[in-house]
């Protein structure tokens, strides 16, 4: 028979009471969780949506069934105890031509924000159409293949896998990665600048440019692939954005004109003219610093760089994130998938034509770097450019929150030890004889 613990004295119970009352309350404040009594939130509808695991399994199976067209690679990176893995699917109609540098290159990323599940569903639909397991209405495969022959398309179906898992575990408003950093604020163009309405729960930029493994992998991918077109696919509204996000202007000259013309064509054909068009910073109502699209345009020199916002429910409660960022009925879900997969095929068809008149690519390096070569270069570059300085100078909200929790725990533990001491000394205080023995 196990020995029962002795009953606790009232003074020893106090720290436990403190622990039970203070800790959950403080953690709630620190995590920014909603109060009790909030309206019921729309859950993820798993009849409509794939779980992250099932979606990636389907894409893997697709690549397995079509090795002549699709190749799938996984890239891993990590630092300070945090690891991330990204799957990249490469489409080339004839896989033997996958390194043909004369082809037109398109890089698409989906699911950079965890709560925007619909975007990864669009990625799966595009890959299904590319492998001819699904079809676009009114498009025959002969004309489709004639322009797909000229392309290499890389698709990142789920950029933020760790953040997406948090969403699936019930944190439906989470948009950041698995350690609380917004992957669309972690790039180096105008990194770290905070607007007056800065909200760390939404926009924590990390401890420095490219502090996050996901952004590091994406940067390596962009540099090694050297795309002509980049599209970062999001949800929350209906919009077709071009640079810049960090200021309310668009770039000057012909590249800007061409991007605008392509977006206008997409708006007419696939968004029934509902989509907002223009620079992200000038159209969305706030400036965003350290975004992927600004980096792709300004630093990686991708001639056509876009951010698409493919769906938003403006009438949903701001706390009802699944509803706000994702269609919740089957007809809207199907409509979004059809409209936006068709929009991407318009890009595949007309993108090269728009770029014919832009010769920006001429001045770029002609050879591709391998991911490994780039990684080595990146790490050397990072230590010399940012070094330790950047790491220690910028304590983001994530760190502050961690220290706050540590402080709180230490306080409760100290209280516990202090109270235990008092109770112990009361219970076992020896009777001191008046006469030494
Ligand atoms: Zn987003």
Image (cartoon, rainbow, N blue to C red):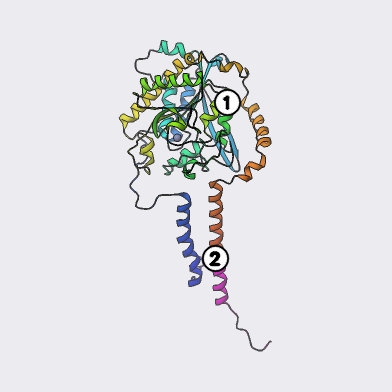
The tag on residue 121 is: none
Q: Earlier in the sequence, mark 2 or mark 1?
A: 1
Cα–Cα gap, marks 2 and 1: 54 Å
Q: Which residues are magenta?
A: 415-437
Kindly tell me whether residue 67 is visible in this rendering.
no
Would you say residue 43 sits in the magenta stretch?
no
Toward which corner of the image does residue 48 lie, by quadrant? top left
Would you say residue 433 sits in the magenta stretch?
yes
Which image quadrant shows ligand 1?
top left
Compared to residue 142, the image places residue 395 above or below, namely: below
Quarter holding the C terminus? bottom right
Between residues 147 and 81, which one lies in front from this camera angle?
147
Compared to residue 346, the image places residue 3 above or below, namely: below
Residue 272 in the image, given as x and y percentages of width and height: 33, 23
Residue at 30%, 29% (x, y): give it.
331
Residue 233 in the image, given as x and y percentages of width and height: 45, 29
Residue at 66%, 35% (x, y): give it.
385
Residue 19 in the image, given as x and y percentages of width and height: 49, 61
Regarding mark 1 in the picture, which secondary structure is present there?
loop
**Mark 1 Cα-neighbour bin, 10 Å: few <14, some 14–19, many ≥20:** some
Kindly tell me whether residue 222 is visible in this rendering.
yes
Total labels: the figure holds 2
Regarding mark 2 in the picture, which secondary structure is present there?
helix
Between residues 18 and 131, which one lies in front from this camera angle?
18
Compared to residue 292, the image places residue 174 above or below, namely: below
Residue annotated with mark 1: 300
**Mark 2 Cα-neighbour bin, 10 Å: few <14, some 14–19, many ≥20:** some
Residue annotated with mark 2: 415
Between residues 77 and 399, which one lies in front from this camera angle?
399
- Disc 2 C-beta below 8 A from ligand 1: no
Compared to residue 118, the image places residue 318 above or below, namely: below
């Amino acid at each position: 028979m196990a020995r029962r613990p002795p009953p606790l004295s009232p003074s020893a119970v106090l720290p436990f009471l403190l622990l039970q009352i203070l800790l959950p309350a403080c953690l709630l404040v620190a995590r920014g969780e909603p109060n009790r009594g909030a309206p019921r939130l729309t859950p993820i509808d798993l009849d409509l949506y794939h779980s992250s695991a099932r979606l990636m399994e389907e894409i893997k199976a697709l690549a397995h069934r079509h090795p002549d067209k699709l190749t799938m690679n996984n890239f891993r990176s990590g630092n300070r105890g945090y690891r991330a893995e990204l799957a990249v699917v490469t489409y080339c109609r004839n896989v033997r031509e996958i390194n043909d540098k004369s082809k037109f290159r398109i890089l698409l990323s989906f699911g950079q924000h965890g709560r925007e599940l619909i975007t990864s569903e669009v990625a799966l639909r595009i890959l299904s159409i590319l492998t001819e397991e699904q079809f676009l209405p009114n498009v025959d495969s002969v004309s489709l293949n004639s322009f797909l022959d000229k392309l290499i398309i890389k698709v990142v179906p789920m950029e933020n896998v760790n953040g997406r898992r948090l969403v699936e575990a019930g944190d439906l408003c989470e948009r950041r990665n698995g350690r609380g950093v917004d992957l669309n604020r972690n790039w180096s163009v105008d990194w770290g600048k905070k607007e007056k309405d800065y909200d760390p729960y939404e926009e924590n930029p990390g401890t420095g440019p490219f502090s996050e493994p996901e952004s590091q992998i994406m940067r390596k991918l962009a540099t090694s692939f050297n795309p002509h077109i980049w599209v970062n696919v999001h949800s929350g509204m209906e919009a077709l954005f071009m640079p810049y996000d960090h200021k309310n202007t668009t770039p000057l000259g012909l590249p800007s004109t061409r991007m605008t013309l392509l977006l206008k064509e997409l708006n007419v054909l696939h968004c029934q003219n509902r989509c907002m068009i223009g620079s992200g910073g000038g159209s969305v109502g706030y400036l965003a610093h350290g975004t992927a699209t600004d980096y792709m345009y300004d630093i990686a020199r991708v001639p056509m760089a876009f951010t698409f916002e493919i769906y938003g429910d403006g009438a949903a409660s701001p706390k009802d994130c699944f509803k706000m960022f994702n269609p919740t009925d089957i007809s809207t879900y199907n409509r979004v998938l059809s409209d936006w997969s068709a929009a991407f095929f318009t890009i595949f068809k007309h993108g090269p034509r728009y770029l014919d008149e832009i010769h920006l690519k001429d001045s770029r390096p002609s050879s591709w770097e391998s991911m490994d070569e780039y990684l080595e270069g990146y790490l050397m570059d990072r230590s010399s450019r940012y070094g330790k300085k950047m790491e220690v100078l910028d304590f983001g909200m994530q760190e502050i929150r961690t220290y706050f929790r540590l402080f709180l725990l230490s306080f409760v533990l100290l209280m516990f030890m202090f109270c235990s001491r008092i109770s112990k000394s009361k219970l076992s205080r020896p009777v001191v004889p008046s006469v030494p023995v």
